[in-house]
Image (cartoon, rainbow, N blue to C red):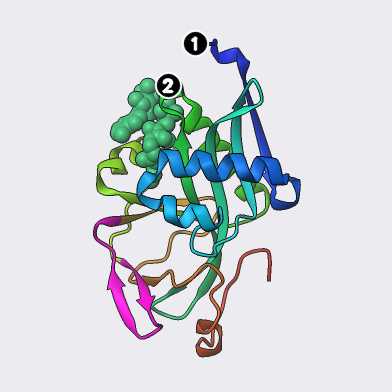
Amino acid sequence: MKNDSSIEYAILTEEQISPELNKELVSYLSEIFPEWAEVFARERAWHDARPIWTTLAFVDGKVVGHTAVVERTITTDWNWRYKVVSLQGVAVRPEWRGRGIGRKLLKLALDEAKRRGYPFATIFCKEKMVPYYESLGWQLPEDSMIMWKDRALPIPMRSNCPMYQVLGEIPFPEGPIDVHNPFGFDVLDRVGDRRTGPRE
Ligand SMILES: CC(C)(COP(=O)(O)OP(=O)(O)OC[C@H]1O[C@@H](n2cnc3c(N)ncnc32)[C@H](O)[C@@H]1OP(=O)(O)O)[C@@H](O)C(=O)NCCC(=O)NCCS
């Protein structure tokens, strides 16, 4: 095992990800999340949620850690809208776990989100991972976040735990939140008042 000083970190936009690296990431994610291999076999973007940037850890030019950052629009009970970042595919290669790589990748992703002016970050994780994210400053909302199936039926989040982190001055909204889809289309027509992040 190499020592920790051999780990290199990078923040890459989609344009900076070469076809070769894309191929490596697809196989990396399929290996770490075998239950989702079918999704990653089609493309790296999780259910069409294309990352804006990806934080990566490399050793000898090979990926040992990954976190992708997508943009999502959340809508609160009072129809306030916020553009937020949402993290996905948080994954460290098994033999490199427990050395702070996950923590560092998440910090890099959130520092970049703060720099770009996003008010909040969200993540959906398995229940057993909640203590991990709590130890890194993530919180479970008091009210449930909801997603919409076919834009009509709300799906309560249970097995998939929503968590958030406040990145700026605005406190996290109270009450139910529709996290909808990464781009927030459709819901845009229904809201009156709005408050958005930096990328209107
Ligand atoms: C979750 C994962 C990314 C963590 O990566 P990592 O590099 O091992 O994490 P870190 O070394 O940064 O851990 C930071 C701290 O969290 C702790 N931690 C790690 N896994 C934990 C878990 N499952 N539950 C609670 N705490 C955990 C570590 O002990 C460490 O604590 P310390 O600072 O007191 O030593 C890695 O285990 C992984 O890839 N798992 C498989 C994929 C996965 O489940 N991803 C999450 C999807 S939501």
Q: Residues within 10 Å of mark 2 (few under 14, many from 20)?
A: few
Q: Is residue 133 left or right of residue 79?
A: left
Looking at the picture, how far across and down is residue 56, in whole percent?
60, 36
Element at badge 1?
loop
Residue bearing mark 1: 1
Looking at the picture, how far across and down is residue 54, in whole percent?
61, 45
Element at badge 2?
helix
Tag 1 and tag 2, C-beta contact below 8 Å: yes
Q: Residues within 10 Å of mark 1 (few under 14, many from 20)?
A: few
* Range covered by the magenta-colored residues: 145-160
Q: Is residue 101 magenta?
A: no
**Residue sitting at x 43%, y 55%:** 38
Q: State whether residue 27 is above or below residue 124.
A: above
Q: Amino acid at mark 2?
A: Glu
Looking at the picture, how far across and down is residue 59, in whole percent?
60, 22
Q: Residue 6's image quarter?
A: top right
Which numbered disc flags the more N-terminal residue, 1 or 2?
Answer: 1
Q: Nearer the viewer, residue 119 or 171?
A: 119
Instruction: Report ligand 1 position as a quadrant.
Output: top left
Q: Amino acid at mark 1?
A: Met
Residue bearing mark 2: 95
Q: Is residue 146 magenta?
A: yes
